[in-house]
Image (cartoon, rainbow, N blue to C red):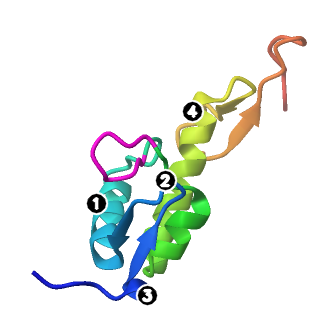
């Protein structure tokens, strides 16, 4: 069993430290499976989540970072009370919901 130099590891706010290679692999799998809502520290029962800045500091692949940003934005729209997806089948834009005004008619 070998050791990893400090510069090849990463620590979250919870102070749990992992080698960057393992973190990249773990985060990549979660992101590629769309599991960005709750990405917690890999140490046992630790509940510390990875911040956007953590994810972008750990990952090196711009394609995976782009997927992370898209999945995260999509998830934020899905759970928002004031936004929804445009109902047109081939549209990927969100629209605001103004519950006080009721449904709006946009032409």
Q: Which mark is residue 14?
A: 2
Asked if the residues shown at circle 2 and circle 1 are in contact, with their CB atoms under 8 angstroms apart, the answer is no
> In what element is the residue under mark 2?
loop
> In what element is the residue under mark 4?
helix
- Mark 2 and mark 3 lie on one chain; the one further toward the N terminus is 3
Residue ID for mark 3: 7
Quarter occupied by residue 96 = top right
Which part of the image, by quadrant, shows the N terminus? Answer: bottom left
* Magenta stretch encompasses residue 63: no
Q: Which mark is residue 29?
A: 1
Q: Which mark is residue 78?
A: 4
Q: Nearer the viewer, mark 1 or mark 3?
A: 3
Which residue is drawn at the image coordinates 41% and 47% (left, top)? Answer: 40
Q: Nearer the viewer, mark 3 or mark 4?
A: 3
Question: Residue 87: x, y in percent?
Answer: 61, 31
Q: Is residue 50 left or right of residue 93?
A: left
């Amino acid at each position: 069993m070998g050791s990893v130099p400090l510069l090849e590891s990463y620590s979250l706010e919870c102070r749990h430290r992992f080698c960057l290679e393992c973190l990249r692999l773990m985060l990549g799998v979660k992101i590629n499976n769309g599991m960005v809502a709750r990405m917690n520290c890999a140490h046992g029962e630790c509940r510390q989540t990875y911040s956007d800045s953590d994810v972008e500091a750990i990952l090196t692949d711009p394609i995976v970072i782009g997927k992370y940003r898209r999945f995260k934005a999509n998830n934020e729209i899905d759970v928002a009370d004031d936004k929804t997806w445009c109902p047109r089948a081939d549209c990927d834009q969100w629209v605001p919901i103004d519950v006080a005004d009721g449904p709006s008619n946009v032409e």
